[in-house]
Image: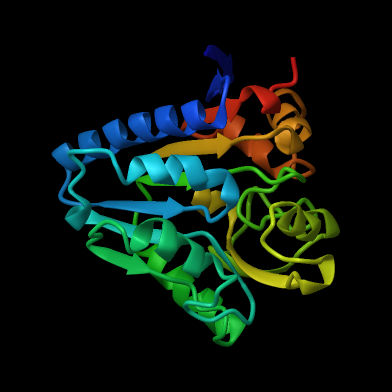
Amino acid sequence: MKELQFEKVKLKVFDTRKEMGREAAREAAACMRQMLAAQEEINCVFAAAPSQNEFLEHLILEEGIDWSRVNGYHMDEYVGFDIGHPDSFNGFLTKAIFSRVPFKSVHLINGANDCHEEAERYSRLLDGIQIDITFMGIGENGHIAFNDPAVADFHDTKTVKVVELDEICRQQQVNDGCFPSFEDVPERALTVTIPKLVSAKEIFCIVPTEKKRCAVKAALTGAVTEVCPASILRTAGDVHMYIDKACYWE
């Protein structure tokens, strides 16, 4: 395992995805236990993507987390996809973690509602809380949540917004095995915006595979700009990033 520092990002590089997910979960669980020892409940925002599989599998096995004092949120959803839709992010997270440990509350984005009204509803929820931990990944185009380069705004005044997904983002969903073809991937989504995501007290960013190598390199070594939305992590608070050897550019 290799440890590196890129401004405010603490990077750990592991030989395998399994090691990456296990260590990320171990450190995230320790953070959650520490927070729960100091406050009544905590608010956690989760990413929904295959890149998070190993992390989530290990996180639910960690002992000593009082999940009955944890409130769960997620960061994006496809427009038109309702609660439980088989290809929805709310469905992914419900299956991966929300239904597997006893959260105090879980707040799902319903993409089948009027998208602008749903954006406002979810914004009100998030505006009423302090995010304690954001668990996220990075997209092939450098996006965080669905803040693709063309719509990313480091100074966004909105908390949740409706966005058009770019071609690289939509193709990634096919590359990840989430949809059979590019045409099947929705063109629009709701996303939590960048300022809200990075307002968390702690950020855990899990990014495996060689497909993300260029995006991670740009995020950590390039300019801090919306051209690579994930580059904002270098200026955020406490950011813990975990990648596998395939994702490392050395």
Q: Is residue 199 visible?
A: no
- Looking at the rendering, in which quadrant would you find the C terminus? top right
Q: In percent of the image, x 81 and y 60: which residue is there?
A: 166
x, y percent for residue 24: 43, 32
* Image coords of residue 91 (percent x, y): 48, 69
Q: Residue at x 35, y 64 (%)?
A: 128
* Residue 29 visible: yes
- The image shows residue 16, relative to residue 3, as above or below, that is below
Residue 183 against residue 38 in the figure, above or below: below
Q: Is residue 182 above or below residue 28?
A: below
| Quadrant of residue 187 within the rendered picture | bottom right
In this view of the protein, which residue sits in the foreground, 158 or 89?
Answer: 89
Identified at 48% across, 40% down, the residue is 54
Tell me where residue 100 appears, x and y as whole percent: 31, 58
Colour pattern: rainbow
The relative height of residue 196 versus residue 212 in the rendered view (above or below) is below
Q: Residue at x 38, y 69 (%)?
A: 107
Q: Quadrant of residue 238?
A: top left
Indicate the quadrant where residue 23 lies. top left
User: Relative to 123, is 172 on the left or the right?
Assistant: right
Q: How many numbered marks, from 0 up?
A: 0
User: Where's residue 48, x and y in %?
Assistant: 53, 56
Task: Tell which of 177 and 44 is nearer to you.
Answer: 177
